[in-house]
Amino acid sequence: AQKITQTQPGMFVQEKEAVTLDCTYDTSDQSYGLFWYKQPSSGEMIFLIYQGSYDEQNATEGRYSLNFQKARKSANLVISASQLGDSAMYFCAMREGWNQGGKLIFGQGTELSVKP
Amino acid sequence: EADIYQTPRYLVIGTGKKITLECSQTMGHDKMYWYQQDPGMELHLIHYSYGVNSTEKGDLSSESTVSRIRTEHFPLTLESARPSHTSQYLCASSDAGDIGNTIYFGEGSWLTVV
Protein backbone atom coordinates (compact mmCIF):
# COMPACT_ATOMS: atom_id res chain seq x y z
CA ALA A 1 0.00 0.00 0.00
CA GLN A 2 1.18 3.47 -0.74
CA LYS A 3 2.27 5.69 2.08
CA ILE A 4 3.44 9.28 2.53
CA THR A 5 5.52 10.37 5.52
CA GLN A 6 6.21 13.90 6.67
CA THR A 7 8.43 13.77 9.76
CA GLN A 8 8.41 17.49 10.65
CA PRO A 9 5.21 18.39 12.53
CA GLY A 10 6.32 22.03 12.76
CA MET A 11 9.03 24.21 11.24
CA PHE A 12 10.16 27.78 11.84
CA VAL A 13 11.96 29.94 9.28
CA GLN A 14 13.10 33.53 9.25
CA GLU A 15 11.51 35.78 6.67
CA LYS A 16 13.50 35.89 3.38
CA GLU A 17 15.33 32.66 4.14
CA ALA A 18 14.87 29.32 2.37
CA VAL A 19 13.25 26.32 4.02
CA THR A 20 13.00 22.63 3.11
CA LEU A 21 9.98 20.53 4.04
CA ASP A 22 10.64 16.80 4.01
CA CYS A 23 8.52 14.12 2.38
CA THR A 24 9.21 10.45 1.81
CA TYR A 25 6.92 8.02 0.09
CA ASP A 26 6.51 4.33 -0.45
CA THR A 27 4.93 2.69 -3.45
CA SER A 28 5.42 -0.39 -5.58
CA ASP A 29 4.01 1.35 -8.64
CA GLN A 30 6.34 2.61 -11.38
CA SER A 31 4.01 5.38 -12.46
CA TYR A 32 2.98 7.88 -9.83
CA GLY A 33 2.76 11.59 -9.19
CA LEU A 34 3.83 13.68 -6.22
CA PHE A 35 2.05 16.86 -5.21
CA TRP A 36 2.47 19.56 -2.61
CA TYR A 37 -0.46 21.54 -1.28
CA LYS A 38 -0.62 24.54 1.05
CA GLN A 39 -3.46 24.87 3.53
CA PRO A 40 -3.86 28.25 5.27
CA SER A 41 -5.87 28.56 8.46
CA SER A 42 -8.99 29.19 6.34
CA GLY A 43 -8.90 25.50 5.39
CA GLU A 44 -8.72 25.66 1.60
CA MET A 45 -6.21 23.47 -0.23
CA ILE A 46 -3.93 25.33 -2.63
CA PHE A 47 -1.97 23.34 -5.22
CA LEU A 48 1.71 24.32 -5.29
CA ILE A 49 3.77 21.95 -7.42
CA TYR A 50 3.76 18.56 -9.14
CA GLN A 51 6.46 16.00 -9.99
CA GLY A 52 5.86 12.92 -12.12
CA SER A 53 7.80 9.74 -11.41
CA TYR A 54 9.23 9.76 -14.94
CA ASP A 55 10.24 13.42 -14.89
CA GLU A 56 14.01 13.73 -14.87
CA GLN A 57 14.13 17.42 -14.02
CA ASN A 58 13.08 18.71 -10.62
CA ALA A 59 9.85 20.69 -10.83
CA THR A 60 9.89 24.42 -10.12
CA GLU A 61 7.04 26.91 -9.75
CA GLY A 62 8.17 30.41 -8.83
CA ARG A 63 9.58 30.29 -5.30
CA TYR A 64 8.71 26.60 -4.96
CA SER A 65 10.90 23.76 -6.11
CA LEU A 66 10.65 20.05 -5.55
CA ASN A 67 13.84 18.14 -4.74
CA PHE A 68 12.98 14.74 -6.22
CA GLN A 69 15.29 11.84 -5.32
CA LYS A 70 13.66 8.77 -6.79
CA ALA A 71 16.10 6.18 -5.44
CA ARG A 72 15.62 7.51 -1.93
CA LYS A 73 11.86 7.92 -2.48
CA SER A 74 11.90 11.48 -1.29
CA ALA A 75 10.16 14.56 -2.65
CA ASN A 76 11.14 17.53 -0.50
CA LEU A 77 9.60 20.96 -1.03
CA VAL A 78 11.97 23.92 -1.04
CA ILE A 79 10.54 27.40 -0.52
CA SER A 80 13.00 30.16 -1.31
CA ALA A 81 12.83 33.68 0.11
CA SER A 82 10.11 32.89 2.67
CA GLN A 83 7.33 35.41 3.15
CA LEU A 84 5.01 35.94 6.11
CA GLY A 85 2.13 34.72 3.93
CA ASP A 86 3.85 31.35 3.60
CA SER A 87 2.84 30.50 7.17
CA ALA A 88 0.44 27.55 6.77
CA MET A 89 0.16 23.77 6.81
CA TYR A 90 1.92 22.02 3.94
CA PHE A 91 0.90 18.60 2.73
CA CYS A 92 2.79 16.19 0.52
CA ALA A 93 0.60 13.82 -1.47
CA MET A 94 1.02 10.95 -3.88
CA ARG A 95 -1.17 9.66 -6.66
CA GLU A 96 -0.69 6.26 -8.23
CA GLY A 97 -1.82 5.27 -11.69
CA TRP A 98 -5.43 4.98 -12.76
CA ASN A 99 -5.37 1.20 -12.41
CA GLN A 100 -4.74 1.86 -8.71
CA GLY A 101 -7.68 4.23 -8.55
CA GLY A 102 -5.90 7.49 -9.15
CA LYS A 103 -6.50 8.41 -5.53
CA LEU A 104 -4.51 11.16 -3.86
CA ILE A 105 -3.07 10.05 -0.51
CA PHE A 106 -1.72 12.68 1.90
CA GLY A 107 1.03 12.84 4.48
CA GLN A 108 0.55 14.11 8.02
CA GLY A 109 1.47 17.67 7.14
CA THR A 110 4.06 20.19 8.33
CA GLU A 111 3.07 23.46 9.95
CA LEU A 112 5.37 26.21 8.74
CA SER A 113 5.72 29.44 10.68
CA VAL A 114 7.59 32.35 9.10
CA LYS A 115 9.05 34.81 11.60
CA PRO A 116 9.59 38.49 10.76
CA GLU B 1 -9.24 29.42 -10.48
CA ALA B 2 -11.01 26.22 -9.43
CA ASP B 3 -14.72 25.97 -10.13
CA ILE B 4 -15.70 23.60 -7.33
CA TYR B 5 -18.16 24.65 -4.70
CA GLN B 6 -19.20 23.28 -1.36
CA THR B 7 -22.23 24.16 0.74
CA PRO B 8 -22.72 24.78 3.54
CA ARG B 9 -19.35 26.18 4.61
CA TYR B 10 -20.24 25.93 8.28
CA LEU B 11 -22.92 23.81 9.92
CA VAL B 12 -23.81 23.17 13.56
CA ILE B 13 -26.44 20.51 14.07
CA GLY B 14 -27.82 18.30 16.80
CA THR B 15 -27.10 14.61 17.28
CA GLY B 16 -29.33 12.32 15.25
CA LYS B 17 -30.06 14.80 12.48
CA LYS B 18 -29.68 13.91 8.82
CA ILE B 19 -27.38 16.17 6.83
CA THR B 20 -26.22 16.46 3.25
CA LEU B 21 -23.05 18.27 2.25
CA GLU B 22 -23.23 19.52 -1.30
CA CYS B 23 -20.36 19.56 -3.78
CA SER B 24 -20.57 20.80 -7.35
CA GLN B 25 -17.99 21.41 -10.04
CA THR B 26 -18.39 23.07 -13.41
CA MET B 27 -15.22 21.76 -15.02
CA GLY B 28 -16.71 18.55 -16.39
CA HIS B 29 -14.35 16.41 -14.33
CA ASP B 30 -15.05 12.69 -14.17
CA LYS B 31 -13.21 12.03 -10.92
CA MET B 32 -14.49 13.39 -7.64
CA TYR B 33 -13.38 12.79 -4.05
CA TRP B 34 -14.44 13.43 -0.47
CA TYR B 35 -11.83 13.85 2.24
CA GLN B 36 -12.30 14.17 5.99
CA GLN B 37 -9.84 16.27 7.99
CA ASP B 38 -9.64 17.04 11.68
CA PRO B 39 -7.98 20.41 12.49
CA GLY B 40 -4.23 20.32 11.95
CA MET B 41 -4.30 16.71 10.85
CA GLU B 42 -3.90 14.85 7.57
CA LEU B 43 -6.65 14.41 5.01
CA HIS B 44 -8.30 11.00 4.84
CA LEU B 45 -10.07 9.81 1.70
CA ILE B 46 -13.57 8.60 2.56
CA HIS B 47 -15.29 8.35 -0.85
CA TYR B 48 -14.44 8.70 -4.52
CA SER B 49 -16.12 8.42 -7.88
CA TYR B 50 -14.87 7.79 -11.40
CA GLY B 51 -18.01 9.04 -13.07
CA VAL B 52 -21.78 8.93 -13.09
CA ASN B 53 -23.19 5.98 -11.11
CA SER B 54 -19.69 5.03 -9.92
CA THR B 55 -18.82 5.38 -6.22
CA GLU B 56 -16.23 3.66 -4.04
CA LYS B 57 -15.32 3.80 -0.38
CA GLY B 58 -12.00 5.34 0.48
CA ASP B 59 -9.24 4.29 2.83
CA LEU B 60 -10.93 5.64 5.97
CA SER B 61 -14.14 3.95 6.99
CA SER B 62 -17.00 6.38 7.16
CA GLU B 63 -20.67 6.14 8.06
CA SER B 64 -21.47 8.64 5.36
CA THR B 65 -22.81 7.77 1.90
CA VAL B 66 -22.41 9.45 -1.47
CA SER B 67 -24.15 9.46 -4.82
CA ARG B 68 -23.14 10.50 -8.32
CA ILE B 69 -26.22 10.93 -10.48
CA ARG B 70 -24.80 13.85 -12.46
CA THR B 71 -21.20 14.50 -13.48
CA GLU B 72 -21.09 17.86 -11.77
CA HIS B 73 -22.67 16.86 -8.46
CA PHE B 74 -21.27 14.64 -5.67
CA PRO B 75 -23.23 15.06 -2.42
CA LEU B 76 -22.30 13.40 0.87
CA THR B 77 -24.99 12.35 3.34
CA LEU B 78 -24.95 11.44 7.02
CA GLU B 79 -28.23 9.75 7.98
CA SER B 80 -27.76 10.28 11.72
CA ALA B 81 -25.06 12.69 12.78
CA ARG B 82 -22.99 12.07 15.90
CA PRO B 83 -20.40 14.20 17.72
CA SER B 84 -17.68 11.90 16.31
CA HIS B 85 -18.60 13.20 12.84
CA THR B 86 -17.43 16.69 13.81
CA SER B 87 -14.73 17.52 11.27
CA GLN B 88 -13.95 19.38 8.08
CA TYR B 89 -15.06 17.71 4.85
CA LEU B 90 -13.26 18.62 1.65
CA CYS B 91 -14.54 17.83 -1.82
CA ALA B 92 -12.16 17.59 -4.77
CA SER B 93 -12.25 16.83 -8.47
CA SER B 94 -9.87 16.18 -11.34
CA ASP B 95 -9.90 15.35 -15.00
CA ALA B 96 -9.08 11.80 -16.03
CA GLY B 97 -6.29 10.80 -18.38
CA ASP B 98 -3.07 12.14 -16.93
CA ILE B 99 -1.82 11.24 -13.48
CA GLY B 100 -0.48 14.75 -13.19
CA ASN B 101 -3.83 16.42 -13.72
CA THR B 102 -4.35 18.89 -10.92
CA ILE B 103 -6.82 17.91 -8.23
CA TYR B 104 -8.92 20.93 -7.34
CA PHE B 105 -10.41 21.32 -3.89
CA GLY B 106 -13.47 23.13 -2.69
CA GLU B 107 -13.26 25.48 0.27
CA GLY B 108 -14.46 22.80 2.67
CA SER B 109 -17.47 22.25 4.90
CA TRP B 110 -16.94 22.56 8.64
CA LEU B 111 -19.39 20.29 10.46
CA THR B 112 -20.01 20.46 14.21
CA VAL B 113 -22.38 17.97 15.79
CA VAL B 114 -23.55 18.87 19.29
Image (tube, rainbow, N blue to C red):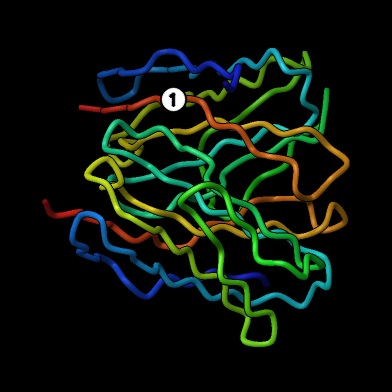
Q: Residue at x 55, y 30 (%)?
A: B91
Element type at mark 1: loop
Dividing the picture into quarters, in which one does residue B13 lie? Answer: top left
Q: Position of residue B84 (x, y in %)?
A: 31, 42
Q: Give the left or right position of residue B113, taking residue B25 as reference.
A: left
Compared to residue B22, the image places residue B92 above or below, namely below
Outermost residue on the bottom side: it is A71
- Figure quadrant of the N terminus of chain B: top right
Dividing the picture into quarters, in which one does residue B66 lie? Answer: top right
Q: Give the left or right position of residue B31, taking residue A111 as reference.
A: right
Q: How many marks?
A: 1
Tell me the subunit letter for badge 1.
B
Give the camera-side residue of B61 and B47: B47
Give the camera-side residue of B49 and A4: A4
Q: Position of residue A78 (x, y in %)?
A: 45, 64
Q: Mark 1 is on which residue type?
A: Glu
Give the camera-side residue of B37 and A20: A20
Give the camera-side residue of B110 and B14: B110
Q: Position of residue B58 (x, y in %)?
A: 63, 49
Q: Position of residue A109 (x, y in %)?
A: 38, 59
Q: Give the left or right position of residue B109, taking residue B45 as reference.
A: left
Compared to residue B42, the image places residue A45 above or below, namely above
Q: Residue at x 43, y 72 (%)?
A: A22
Compared to residue A54, the image places residue B13 above or below, namely above
Q: Give the left or right position of residue B16, taking residue B97 as reference.
A: left
Q: Residue at x 27, y 40 (%)?
A: A85
Disc 1 marks which residue? B107
Disc 1 residue crowd, few under 14, some 14–19, many 20+, Cα 10 Å: many
Dividing the picture into quarters, in which one does residue A42 lie? Answer: top left
- Figure quadrant of the C terminus of chain B: top left
Q: Residue at x 41, y 32 (%)?
A: A44
